[in-house]
Structures are given as structure tokens and as C-alpha cells.
Image (spheres, rainbow, N blue to C red):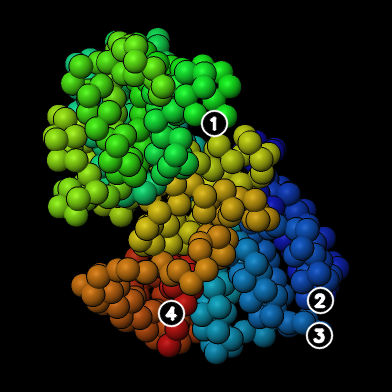
Amino acid sequence: MAADHAPVLLVVDDDDQICRMLERYGRKLGYQVESRSGGREALAALATSRPDVALVDLQMPGTGGLDVLKAVRDVYEECRVILMTGHATVDTAIEAVKLGALDYLCKPLPFDRLGALLTDAQEDLARRRTLLEADTQTAKRIELCGMIGRGQLMENLFALLKRLAPHVRTALVTGETGTGKELIARALHQLGPRSRKRFVAVNCAAVVEGLFESELFGHVRGAFTGATDTKAGLFEAADGGTLFLDEVGELPMTVQAKLLRILETGELHRVGSLEARTVDVRIVAATNRNLDEAVAAGRFRRDLLYRLNVVQIGAPPLRDRREDIPYLTAAFIAGCRERFQTAVSGVTPAAEAVLREYEWPGNVRELRNVLERACLLADGQLLTDRDVARALPAGSSRSAGASAPARAGRTARKAFKQVQFDEIERALRETAGNKSAVARTLGVSRRALYRRLDKHAAAGISS
């Protein structure tokens, strides 16, 4: 493993001789090793030290090993903690496992077993780093004009955009806030014959009502108070290219009539001018509202809706394409590393589970904002579930808005995991805490047993 990626091993023991011995052993296996001579010193160092693996003595004066285990797992959820003791009991072994310990070793230490644990931890860390890098590279490969997705919904969307871009002159993009409607409009522009011309975007909801006509169509000098100069509007600025009308449902009725005329004839009049000007503009409109309801309520012209809705493109909500979340996450975190110079390179499995389960009412935009906040506030290289939860909007939860069947499914899965843990606990008691014997009893590999214990600890399952 490269030196700059060497994992950090924290050794905590009040016996200096054991600390020095484990320092030498850990370095021989390729770890960067830090040692602390007691639990209180270890807790004080957690503010600056971020271990990947910790070897902690169970019985130390003052702050004991279980206290250190709790603190390490609270601060660095992904850290693997191995407890060491000269006085093993079944009850303390079970308590250690419940608190998230990777293993429980008796002194004198069985170095063959310790070496296997440390090597497995190294391999797991390397695998995780490889997977994170693979997600980042995959995100680059499956990107289209700023949009990322490899699920069926996004593949269908990408294929539709490629098919429409060379031909369509008017399109309506629908979808919830934050789904990437402007990116869809930009894709139509970039993939079509107008890509060398200007792409002009205007948020109709942000324009002062009295200035709509001037902003879109321009005005001549003296057309109204304050019109000291003649000004071209956004339609003329986009001539030959694409004009993106975001939140088109916010247009006043008077402006809607003029927009309809431009769509039908290609002609516009600047405010205060009788001279007709011809423009050649592709118009892509977008809305997060139901325009049919707006038509029924008299807020939107039916003939304009027909004219805009020659082609309708739907932007899928993030909750319907959760399989894309790991790749979006990898891309956004890579962007944060570059912009903010943070050390964060990915997320822990528990954090990824939180991201997958949350309902994302703000969709991809909300995901990006949450990850940016989490990256700026995080201390380590991997975002934990706590980092993500802290960055989510106040009052939200990972299951917010979930359906009753989904909640029932999660309850069933948790109950099943509880049964699994009960089986492991019984086996631990029967084998006096020997995990190799537990693995044989359950018919699984030792590594699979450790992974299962890690998952149970992360989920907060206990007897």
C-alpha cells in the first residue's frame, strides 16, 4: 500500500512495553502507528488523531477500554477497534461486540490472529478506497452534459435528448424542484446544431413583474420612465441559439400573449417600438407546476401550453432513481475536494445507507447541498452517517415521507437482523467469545462474521 495511503493504527495500553512491541509489529505490517499510554490520553487525542484501526487494552486505570471503544466508535464510526485483555470473560466479550468491537483478544496476544485481523482491515480499507475511486470514474463515464445516471430512467432520458436535440425547436421540461431541468435544456442546446450559439437562461419567477416585457423583448429609449437607452431583450440575445424560460408558469398573461406570437411568427416588438424584429430562437420552457391546472384556473393560456408542449420531457425525481445516488455522491464529493480543498474522499457504508433511504424532497440539488455542508463540517476522509444526518435539513429524517409499506419493510429487516444477532450472541456465550469458533458454528467465514457484527453495531442492534 502506498505510503500516503498507509492506514493509521492507534495502540492504547498503560503498559509502555506492550505499546512499543505493538508499534513495531504494526509498522512491519505497513501501518502508521500512534500509541497512547492510557484511556484518558487516548480520548484527548481523538480531536487530532483519526485512526483506521485501534488496539485498546480493556483494563486501564481511570478510563477503561470499553469507554475508549465507545468514544472511538462515536467519533469515528468506521474505525475498527480490537480489545485486548489479560482477564477475559464471556460477558465483557459480548459487551465489547455490542459496542462495535471488531474482536476481543486475550493476552498474551495470539499474533497469528492479530496479524490476520490487521491484514483483513488493511484489505478492507484498500477495497473501500478502490470502490470509491471506481464510483468517481464511473460517474465521469455516465455523465451527459452535467447529468449523471446509469439507471433505466436516466438512460431513457439521455437517449431521448440525443434523439430530439438535432430537430426540436420548442420543448417543455417538467419536474420537481432540483431535478435538473436546466441541465436538460442545456443538453438539448449542446447536443444540437445551435451549440456554437448562445444559451440564455431566465428565471421567470425572479423577474420584477413590471419589467417582464422589457427583459424578454427589449425596449427603446423613452419607452417608459427610466428607459434612458435602447436595450435589446433576451430573445435577441439568444438569436440563433436557445432561450431557456425557467418557471414559465410565472409569466403574466400579457407576456404570454406576446410569447405565443413569437413562437408562431418569429417576430417581436421592443417595448415602445412599432418596428418588428425577426428572431430565430429555440425555446425550452420549464416548470415544476401542473400547467393544465393553471389553464383551468385561468392563470395560463391554453394555446400557449399547446405551443410549448410540442415535446414534453420529464425530469425524474431522485427518489425514483436511488441507484444513481452513489455516483452522484462520488461526483459531488470530488467537486468539493477540488473547490474547498477538503480531505473527504467518500462516504462510509452507513452514510451511504442514509443517503439512499432519505426521500430527497429537493432532489439532486438538495443532495449536492447536503454533501457540500457535510464535507465542510467533517473531520475525516470518509463522511459518516452522523456527518450526513447533521447536514440534512433540521427536522428531517432518513425515512421522512416514506410509505407505510416501506416502513414496514424496514421494520421486518431490523427484526430479522435482531434474530441474527441473537444467534451470534448465543454462539459467543457457548464458545467463550472465540469468534473463529462462532464462525464455524454459524457456517460462515470469519470475515463474513466480522462484517455482520459491524452492520449490527452500526444499526444499533442489541439484545
The answer to whether marks 3 and 4 mark residues whose Cβ atoms lie closer than 8 Å is no
Residue 44 in the figure: left or right of residue 304: right
- N-terminal of the two: label 3 or label 4? 3
> Rounded to the nearest whole Å, what is the CA distance between mark 1 and mark 3?
79 Å
As shown in the figure, which amino acid type bears the numbered disc 2? Answer: Arg
Select label 2 or label 1 by which is in front.
1
> Rounded to the nearest whole Å, what is the CA distance between mark 3 and mark 4?
28 Å
- N-terminal of the two: label 4 or label 2? 2
Res 227 visible: yes
The answer to whether marks 3 and 2 mark residues whose Cβ atoms lie closer than 8 Å is yes
Residue 199 image point, x, y percent: 41, 21
- N-terminal of the two: label 1 or label 3? 3
Residue 160 image point, x, y percent: 19, 28
The residue where tag 1 is placed is 225
- N-terminal of the two: label 1 or label 4? 1
The answer to whether marks 4 and 2 mark residues whose Cβ atoms lie closer than 8 Å is no
> Rounded to the nearest whole Å, what is the CA distance between mark 3 and mark 2?
7 Å
The residue where tag 2 is placed is 40
Count of number-bearing discs? 4
Depth check, front residue: 253 or 162: 253
Q: Residues within 10 Å of mark 3 (few under 14, many from 20)?
A: few
The residue where tag 3 is placed is 62
As shown in the figure, which amino acid type bears the numbered disc 3? Answer: Gly
Label 1 residue SS: loop
- N-terminal of the two: label 2 or label 1? 2
Q: Which mark is residue 461?
A: 4
Q: Residue at x 64, y 59 (%)?
A: 53
As shown in the figure, which amino acid type bears the numbered disc 1? Answer: Thr
118 vs 200: above or below? below
- N-terminal of the two: label 3 or label 2? 2
